[in-house]
Image (cartoon, helix red, strand yellow):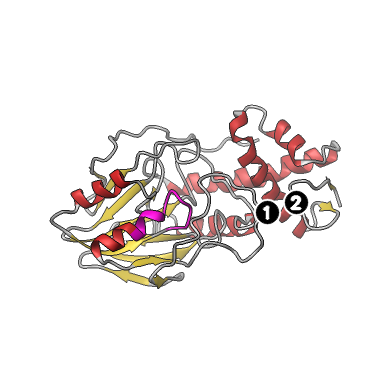
Amino acid sequence: MAAITPFNRTLDFRYGEVATISPLVRRIIARNPSPFTFHGTGTYIVGHGEVAVIDPGPAIEAHVAAIRTALANETVTHILVTHTHRDHSPAAVLLHEATGAPTYGFGPHGSGRPDSGAEVEEGGDYSFQPHVQVRTGNTIEGRDWTFEAVHTPGHTSNHICYALSNEKALFCGDHVMGWSTTVVSPPDGDMRAYFESLRTCLARADTKDSVYYPTHGAPVDAPRPLVAALLAHRVEREIEIAACLRDRITTIPAMVSRIYASVPAVLHPAAARTVLSHLIHMVATGRAACDGPPRETSSFRLP
């Protein structure tokens, strides 16, 4: 299997403290570390005087207080949310109540497909409803900054990135991260959509976006090779699944045991959801088969 561009798991920070990332960008990291959030949620502040806040994070009182303290002499005019997992959006409501600033996002959580009841990562924030719904190409402007919205479904159906044209920077949420691959868990996570969204980012890299600011982990200073490597990784994961089927390994738990043998067992449930998402994609494109709709309990085969 081709190696992914080496991940950067180095991050110099202190919880609750504001770090200057670029002339227009600052960051505060919430104390919610986990195998899926890395050190925690990185909330970004863009601009000076009149600012936008991106991904306010979980509803942790100390984190919201740190954001408000950092902006004591400034005005929050926009609150942008990349997607509705509970480590990204719940504090948006608290920040809106404190500042009056409207929230922006693609829409509420959920693809409209029935949930299987499985939950990995931080789970969905079903209470979030943005004041302003945004779509690809929409412009969001402040006093000294301008964002272009880029819808990137896959990790969730409502995942959206914000491109800061002033600095050719993409606030990419969990769509691309420099420290880890992204979990794609059905039904709201969709592997076909994730492939397409990676290709969208690849087409924008360099010309429109020369640096990425993920919500977890350090900035990605060379996005093109990372996005290309992540795309190749997903292609090769499906090759590995096809190899399992050829060897009559037909269930997802058995595939996870083989493919993710070197990965800690605590991450295997999330791996199983991603393998299911790959298999849904493979069944839809005629490269795998099963009886009935693909489920985590299905037995799969070559068509």
- Which residue is at 44% across, 55% downward? 205
Q: Label 2: which residue?
A: 295
Is 197 inside the magenta-drawn segment? Answer: no
Indicate the quadrant containing the N terminus: top left, top right, bottom left or bottom right.
Answer: top right
First in residue order: circle 2 vs circle 1: 1
Q: Position of residue 181 (x, y in %)?
A: 54, 42
Image: 27 above or below 148: above
Name the residue at the left extreme: 73
Q: Give the x, y percent position of residue 72.
A: 15, 54
Secondary structure of the residue carrying numbered label 1: loop
Taken as a whole, is the magenta stretch helix, strand or loop?
Answer: loop
Q: Is residue 204 visible?
A: yes
Q: Which mark is residue 116?
A: 1
Q: Amino acid at mark 2?
A: Arg
Label 2–label 1 contact, CB within 8 A: yes
Three-letter amino acid code at the position of disc 1: Ser
Name the side, left or right, on which 4 lies relative to 60. Answer: right
- Mark 2 surroundings within 10 Å by alpha-carbon count, few (fewer than 14), some (14 through 19), many (20 or more): some
Viewer-proximal residue among 178 and 50: 50
User: How far is disc 2 from disc 1 in space, using C-alphas?
Assistant: 9 Å
Residue 253 in the figure: left or right of residue 77: right
Q: Which residues are magenta?
A: 82-93
Where does residue 236 sit, x and y in percent of width and height? Answer: 67, 43
Q: Residue at x 71, y 55 (%)?
A: 281
Residue 169 appears in the rendering: no
Q: Position of residue 128 (x, y in %)?
A: 44, 62
> In the displayed structure, does residue 226 sit left or right of residue 113?
left
